[in-house]
């Protein structure tokens, strides 16, 4: 590690010491002087924090000045770094001349830091011969960097590294078809190029030019605590590879907290999963035409809050565009005026989720196949517009093992694949009409009924189930109650 950095790193220690003193003073004031002590504690804490902050700012300023004022010094620092890197594998982008104020372009500087981090410290390898970088870190030093081209990783591939701790902003001439950070080795013949890469604590501002992060043919990538804004295409796009985990992150084309007057014209996609075996958890998508677009199977989505663009204005919360091979789990999510759309769902599970503002689940027919679908145990809240909690868009001819059950709704129309009903009357025919509640038209796979006729003992039978109406008949007029259970599945 170069000397300048070691000097700089003392600042947090001084600051921490001051803070601890302040805390000690505050704690004793609290215990001895009650409410007054609390005020004293807050003031002392603030004073120490303000002092520390000033010191930190001064140091940061000095540091920036020294880096910017002398290219010779920067070059010397790089030479030091090259010799010191045998012991430290933390690459500070400001040591490479990156401008943490965001005033000047830092693309080349950050790409050099990345290239150095990719110099393999050993001959150790990971899956399929990916070089093991031993935990190397590219540290953004808490700065904001302007970049005019994507940050790219060496095509030689690499694993066990992280990029973290700062902000990146696309320049006004950043290419619109690229991403701020690209894990992509074009032309590589390996199955996977990057493994156990962590992208953490980053704000990516795409400046309405292209996307935030592209993860291509990578294995076990952690995307953690990102804030991705102003994307024109995707916030994060995962293509090929598997086991990317996107968690604790925020995606929005526009910085807004809802009720945005421009919501109707939001475009772009928060997260695009075009690979298998990925996980999205604890993520908020606060503006985009589509929250999460899934185009390959075997992904799991949980704890997601989508309020990206109301479905009433043409938006979609989660779009599963994998007709015939959905294999997707969605649980514990909050669809906030945004719907889930699944094309020809085959193996889809949606449970434990909250749908607000007439958001619903739309099954969209492509070849008319719905098989192995579970939409169970969700709650829906609507505005009495007669919107179905699960809506069929098109005609499904192949329906098998579709369970839409035990959902609860207010202000919306419950749809289900199983239902119960009762008919009371005096005569020889009883009809229970299940057509308002059953999801699929004219489909009853199983019926069970019981006829209660007091002292009478008529002969009776199930006469007709067409049009989702169950008709029970007796061989003589009686006064009876008929209870009926139906299921659209036959087994
Ligand atoms: C890596 O392998 C090469 C070739 O076998 C060898 O010369 C070199 O010493 C090895 N390096 C380390 C760090 O083990
Ligand atoms: C049922 O109808 C028959 C004739 O229509 C009538 O005689 C009988 O009282 C009715 N029973 C009841 C319980 O209403
Ligand atoms: C069942 O009801 C439908 C509609 O009323 C009718 O068209 C059909 O003929 C009935 N089937 C039988 C077996 O009675």
Image: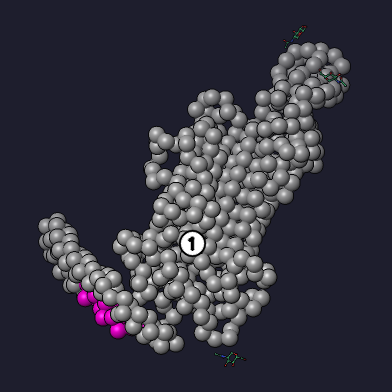
Q: Position of residue 393 (x, y in %)?
A: 67, 32
> Image quadrant of ligand 2?
top right
Residue toward you, 324 or 185: 185
Q: Is residue 294 visible?
A: yes
List the residue tagged with mark 1.
150
For the stretch drawn in magenta, the main secondary structure is: helix
Residue 165: quarter of image:
bottom left
Residue 16: quarter of image:
bottom left
Query: Looking at the image, which residue is at 41% across and 77% down?
Result: 90
Residue 440 to residue 39: above or below: above
Query: Looking at the image, which residue is at 51% across and 84% down?
Result: 121
The region drawn magenta spans: 1-15
481 falls in the magenta region: no
Query: Looking at the image, which residue is at 52% across and 79% down?
Result: 133
4 falls in the magenta region: yes
Residue 374 to residue 49: above or below: above
Q: Is residue 199 left or right of residue 100?
A: right
Q: Position of residue 338 (x, y in %)?
A: 53, 39
Residue toward you, 45 or 185: 185
Q: Is residue 449 left or right of residue 219?
A: right
Q: Is residue 24 visible?
A: no
Residue 229 to residue 411: above or below: below
């Amino acid at each position: 590690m170069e000397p300048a950095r070691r000097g700089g790193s003392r600042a947090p220690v001084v600051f921490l010491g001051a803070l601890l003193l302040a805390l000690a003073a505050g704690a004793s004031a609290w215990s001895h002087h009650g409410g007054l002590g609390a005020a004293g504690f807050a003031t002392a804490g603030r004073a120490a924090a303000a002092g520390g902050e000033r010191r930190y700012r001064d140091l940061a300023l000095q540091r920036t000045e020294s880096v910017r004022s002398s290219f010779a010094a920067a070059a010397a620092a790089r030479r030091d770094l090259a010799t010191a890197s045998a012991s430290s594998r933390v690459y500070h982008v400001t040591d490479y001349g990156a401008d943490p104020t965001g005033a000047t372009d830092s693309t080349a500087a950050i790409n050099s830091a990345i290239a150095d981090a990719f110099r393999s410290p050993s001959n150790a390898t990971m899956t399929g011969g990916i070089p093991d970088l031993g935990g190397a870190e590219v540290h953004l030093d808490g700065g904001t960097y302007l970049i005019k081209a994507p940050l790219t990783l060496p095509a030689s591939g690499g694993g066990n590294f992280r990029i973290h701790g700062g902000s990146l902003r696309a320049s006004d001439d950043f290419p619109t078809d690229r991403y701020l950070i690209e894990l992509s080795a074009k032309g590589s013949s390996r199955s996977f190029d990057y493994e156990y890469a962590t992208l953490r604590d980053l704000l990516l501002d795409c400046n309405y030019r292209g996307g935030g992060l592209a993860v291509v043919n990578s294995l076990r990538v952690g995307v953690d605590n990102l804030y991705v804004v102003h994307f024109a295409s995707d916030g994060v796009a995962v293509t090929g590879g598997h086991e990317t985990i996107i968690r604790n992150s925020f995606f929005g084309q526009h910085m807004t907290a809802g009720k945005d007057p421009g919501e109707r014209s939001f475009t772009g996609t928060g997260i695009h999963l075009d690979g298998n075996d990925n996980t999205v958890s604890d993520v908020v998508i606060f503006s985009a035409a589509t929250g999460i677009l899934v185009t390959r199977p075997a992904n799991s989505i949980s704890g997601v809050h989508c309020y990206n663009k109301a479905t009433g204005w043409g938006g979609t919360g989660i779009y599963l565009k994998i007709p015939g091979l959905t294999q997707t789990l969605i649980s514990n999510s909050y669809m906030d005026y945004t719907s889930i759309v699944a094309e020809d769902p085959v193996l889809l599970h949606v449970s434990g989720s909250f749908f607000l503002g007439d958001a619903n689940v739309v099954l969209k027919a492509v070849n008319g196949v719905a098989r192995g679908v579970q939409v169970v145990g969700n709650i829906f809240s609507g505005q009495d517009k007669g919107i179905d909690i699960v809506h069929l868009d098109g005609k499904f001819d192949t329906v098998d093992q579709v369970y839409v059950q035990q959902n609860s709704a207010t202000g919306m129309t419950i749809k289900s694949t199983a239902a119960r009903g009762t008919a009371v009357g005096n005569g020889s025919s009883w009809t229970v009409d299940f057509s308002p509640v059953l999801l699929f038209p004219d489909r009853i796979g199983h019926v069970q009924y019981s006829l209660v006729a007091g002292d009478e003992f008529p002969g009776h039978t199930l006469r007709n189930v067409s049009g989702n109406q169950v008709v029970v008949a007796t061989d003589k007029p009686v006064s009876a109650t008929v209870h009926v259970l139906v299921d659209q599945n036959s087994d």
